[in-house]
Image (tube, coloured by chain):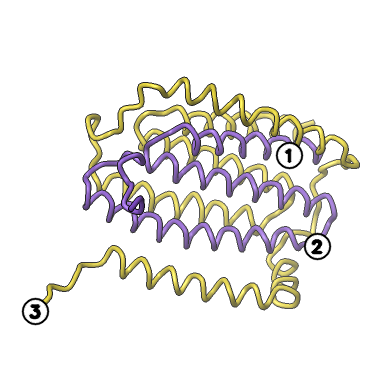
């Protein structure tokens, strides 16, 4: 089946991108790896018939947020000698894996106990703009408005934090 | 199978935790948090497909909005810290230690 093949390709690309982010020494390489992960996640969303989220993932995440991060990384002009020295990096990786692996295995076991269902691609009536919009504006109206306030607060906060300080008279 | 998507989401989340725990570069820590948010999004969409309801899609959109707000604020803080100390090491940022 072509859907399973596509899932395997996207899953491997996403995991490679995540590992590249964690292993890369310079944040620029890590950011490019993260962009790869996000684009392959968009492919996975399209396999799950989430059309609107597929488009939003490409536009908002891979387009807007990652370009903002890349812009800031380039803006700060980080050279090799500015990077923190991480001599004990591999020990930290090992310790992290030792702590995280049991939790991951436990959650994998829990997920495998779920009732199985084929992820066949659905046609109209699932995941489009209309279906998501109906649910969003009927049942999730209050969280939607709260998110708009959150965005306003973060906008003002970013301007106050990163803006120029006024010189005291 | 839906369970494969969920397992992939768990793997990505664990990689994100590993990045937060074991790296000291501010940007790498921040992008690992973004990776964790993405893994949560994948789980939301997979569960939404499993139950054939649209609530997971709405939640994924909310997560995206929160991630955008977080990116704007966190990058402003990183610029300020870089101006203040001209370092990117999380161990150097101990202003709140008293």
At x 75%, y 36%, the residue is A107
Instruction: Give the mark nearest the N terminus, 3 or 2.
Output: 2
Q: Chain of mark 3?
A: A
Q: Chain of mark 2?
A: A
Residue under pointer 2: A125
Figure chain in purple: B
Label 1, on which residue? Answer: B5
Horizontal and vertical percent position of residue A162: 28, 63
The residue at 28%/51% (across/down) is B81
Q: Nearer the viewer, mark 1 or mark 2?
A: 1
Chain drawn in yellow: A
Question: Tags 3 and 1 in contact by the CB under 8 Å rule?
Answer: no
Q: Residue at x 44, y 56 (%)?
A: B71
Label 3 close to label 2 by CB (< 8 Å): no
Between the C-alphas of marks 1 and 2, the distance is 22 Å
In this picture, is A118 found above or below B48?
Answer: above
Residue under label 3, please give it. Answer: A169
Depth check: B33 or A3 in front? B33
Please state which of residues A118 and B17 is positioned toward the viewer in this rendering.
B17
Query: The residue tagged with tag 1: helix, strand or loop?
Result: helix
Is circle 3 on the same chain as circle 1?
no
User: In this figure, what is the number of numbered marks?
Assistant: 3
> Which quadrant does the N terminus of chain A fall into?
top right
Which of A145/A61 is in front?
A: A145
The answer to whether dots 3 and 2 both sit on one chain is yes
Q: Are marks 1 and 2 on the same chain?
A: no
- A134 to B37, vertically: above or below: below
Residue occupying image coordinates x 47% and y 20%:
A91
Return the residue nearer the eye: A106 or B79: A106
């Amino acid at each position: 089946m072509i859907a399973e093949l596509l899932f395997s390709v996207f899953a491997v690309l996403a995991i490679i991108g995540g590992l590249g982010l964690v292993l890369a020494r310079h944040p620029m390489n890590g950011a490019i790896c993260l962009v790869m992960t996000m684009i392959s996640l968009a492919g996975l969303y399209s396999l799950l018939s989430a059309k609107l989220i597929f488009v939003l993932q490409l536009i908002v995440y891979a387009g807007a947020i990652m370009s903002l991060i890349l812009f800031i990384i380039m803006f700060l002009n980080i050279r090799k000698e500015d990077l923190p020295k991480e001599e004990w990096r591999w020990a930290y990786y090992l310790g992290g894996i030792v702590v995280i692996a049991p939790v991951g295995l436990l959650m994998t076991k829990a997920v495998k106990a779920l009732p199985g269902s084929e992820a066949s691609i659905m046609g109209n009536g699932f995941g489009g703009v209309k279906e998501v919009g109906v649910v969003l504006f009927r049942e999730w109206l209050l969280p939607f408005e709260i998110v708009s306030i959150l965005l306003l607060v973060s906008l003002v906060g970013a301007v106050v934090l990163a803006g120029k300080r006024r010189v005291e008279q | 199978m839906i369970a494969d998507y969920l397992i992939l989401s768990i793997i990505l989340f664990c990689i994100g935790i590993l990045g937060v725990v074991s790296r000291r570069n501010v940007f790498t820590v921040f992008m690992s948090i973004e990776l964790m948010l993405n893994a949560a999004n994948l789980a939301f969409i997979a569960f939404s497909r499993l139950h054939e309801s649209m609530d997971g899609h709405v939640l994924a959109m909310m997560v995206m909005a929160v991630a955008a707000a977080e990116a704007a604020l966190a990058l402003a803080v990183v610029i300020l810290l870089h101006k203040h100390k001209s370092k990117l090491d999380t161990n150097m940022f101990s202003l709140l230690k008293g």
